[in-house]
Amino acid sequence: MNEIYFSERIFRLKEQVRAFLKEELEPIKEEINRTKEIPPSIIRKMGNEGFFGPLIPREFNGTELGMVSHCMITEEISRLNVAVSVTRTPCILNGFLINNFGNISQKENYLRRLEKTRCKMSFWHP
């Protein structure tokens, strides 16, 4: 990453994400590819690391790191396994929509649970 455009915080986060992935995802990435199943434990661990909350405000248990951090987290996870990275998509997009367009009741109900993956989200259209 180019230091002119990215803060030291982004570089620290990148190292944190890489360390997590090396320890947690690297050892099982071939098994995930072979079985085509992502262990729920890896999703929970990503939630505990804050990987689902960069666009969610701290007041709703998010990390409020911003879009650049979200993109960097996505890129780093995708380097090892795109399928694991994509598991974040419904939570990130729906969380973004609820945060920006939801009422306070919806934010309290969904965003607080979303960050630690206690709330599963998906897309639905009638």
Image (cartoon, rainbow, N blue to C red):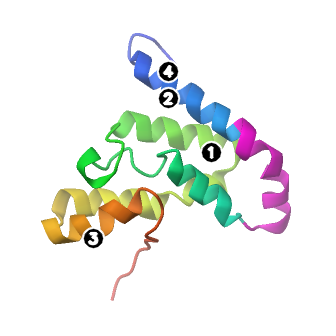
| Side (left or right) of 13 relative to 23 | left
Question: Residue 2: x, y in percent?
Answer: 48, 14
Return the residue at label 4. Answer: 11
| Side (left or right) of 61 relative to 71 | left
Question: Which region of the structure is painted magenta?
Answer: 22-37
The crowd level at tag 1 (other Cα within 10 Å; few <14, some 14-19, many 20+) is some
Distance of mark 4 from mark 1, alpha carbons? 17 Å
Return the residue at label 1. Answer: 78
The crowd level at tag 3 (other Cα within 10 Å; few <14, some 14-19, many 20+) is few
Q: Amino acid at mark 1?
A: Ser
Identity of the residue drawn at 54% across and 28% down: 14
Is residue 36 magenta-colored? Answer: yes
Q: Nearer the viewer, residue 52 or 81?
A: 52
Q: Amino acid at mark 3?
A: Asn
Q: Nearer the viewer, mark 1 or mark 2?
A: 2
**Disc number for residue 109:** 3
Is disc 2 in contact with disc 3, using a CB cutoff of under 8 Å? no
Is disc 4 in contact with disc 2, using a CB cutoff of under 8 Å? yes
Nearest to N terminus: mark 1 or mark 2: 2
Question: Residue 120: x, y in percent?
Answer: 46, 71
Return the residue at label 2. Answer: 13
Distance of mark 3 from mark 4, alpha carbons? 33 Å
Nearest to N terminus: mark 2 or mark 3: 2
Q: Amino acid at mark 4?
A: Phe
Q: Which residue is at the far top?
A: 4
